[in-house]
């Protein structure tokens, strides 16, 4: 999703269309995973059926959203022009986030670590979904979310603890690294990205608040994902999640689990 969004932007697709298409696809993926439109079509599913499947997936996730935003997302285009993504896209996908760090304490690394492409995508998408809460422009928040870690294409993430050790050199180092990434963009796209990124430093604007909320939520949810998995019980996954789900062979499967003392 991160690479595709930047490829669309690099092709000159308006940021509004990119934000809408990428957010809609992310919502569908929350249910369908990597079963995207191209994969479903390759499996022989007709185009109308593919659209219906994806529409149901988006609708299921979009129900709690602002009604106007929900309608906007459901009207997203299936296909957009594409171009090669900027080089920093691949570097950010290979760059792991630092995990949980605090000055004077050991680092807590949760495996597998989230990378910066994943984090940036999550923040961009969440920013669009949260934008109506502050009457913010979702497109500005989306672009800022995609771009807010451009400096990490050069600088490995050392977390809060490491950054504090750079002291007065932190800001100029980040600015230089960000410039190197921005130099890979055409002039019009660069202007769009730089304009959107003006919301990043604080929560003084509606767009800044939507971005800060999305960034904070992803940072905490990424840790909560690991904590939730660690405290999950066998009773929960078998009885509530249907790990062995209903079907003609379920009675036999349940009997096997009981005999192996794995039933819960």
Image: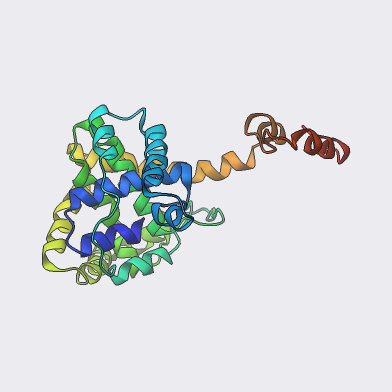
Q: Using the rendered image of the protein, determine whether residue 168 is visible from the camera's viewpoint.
A: no
Q: Quadrant of residue 180?
A: bottom left
Looking at the rendered image, the quarter that the N terminus falls into is bottom left
**Residue 259 at x, y = what percent?**
88, 38
Looking at the image, the residue that sits furthest to the right is 259
The residue lying toward the viewer, choosing from 15 and 250, is 250
The figure's colour scheme reads: rainbow
User: Residue 244 is drawn in which quadrant?
Assistant: top right
Q: Residue 120: horizontal and vertical position, in percent?
A: 35, 53
Q: Is residue 147 above or below residue 222?
A: below
Q: Is residue 28 left or right of residue 5?
A: right
Determine whether 230 is above or below 88 in the image: above
Q: What residue is at 27 percent from the left and 61 percent from the top?
A: 6
In-front residue for pair 95/56: 56
Q: Quadrant of the C terminus?
A: top right
The reply, left or right, for residue 191 in relation to residue 259 is left
Q: Is residue 128 visible?
A: yes
Residue 171 located left or right of residue 95:
left
Q: Is residue 99 above or below residue 217?
A: below
Residue occupying the point 27% across, 43% down: 211
């Amino acid at each position: 999703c991160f690479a595709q969004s930047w490829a669309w932007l690099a092709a000159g697709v308006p940021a509004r269309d990119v934000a809408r298409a990428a957010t809609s696809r992310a919502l569908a993926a929350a249910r369908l995973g990597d079963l995207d439109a191209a994969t479903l079509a390759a499996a022989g599913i007709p185009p109308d059926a593919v659209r219906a499947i994806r529409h149901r997936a988006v609708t299921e996730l979009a129900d709690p959203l602002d009604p106007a935003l929900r309608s906007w997302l459901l009207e997203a285009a299936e296909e957009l022009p594409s171009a090669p993504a900027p080089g920093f896209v691949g570097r950010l996908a290979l760059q792991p986030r630092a995990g949980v760090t605090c000055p004077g304490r050991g680092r807590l690394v949760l495996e597998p670590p989230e990378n910066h492409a994943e984090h940036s995508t999550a923040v961009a998408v969440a920013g669009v979904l949260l934008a109506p809460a502050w009457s913010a422009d979702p497109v500005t928040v989306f672009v800022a979310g995609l771009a807010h870690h451009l400096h990490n294409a050069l600088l490995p993430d050392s977390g809060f603890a490491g950054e504090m050790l750079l002291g007065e050199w932190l800001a100029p180092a980040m600015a230089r690294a960000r410039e190197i990434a921005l130099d890979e963009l055409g002039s019009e796209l660069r202007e769009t990205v730089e304009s959107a990124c003006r919301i990043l430093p604080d929560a003084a604007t509606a767009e800044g608040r939507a971005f800060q909320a999305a960034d904070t939520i992803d940072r905490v949810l990424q840790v909560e994902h690991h904590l939730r998995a660690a405290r999950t019980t066998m009773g929960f996954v078998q009885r509530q999640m249907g790990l062995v789900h209903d079907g003609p062979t379920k009675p036999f499967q349940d009997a096997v689990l009981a005999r192996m003392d794995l039933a819960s």
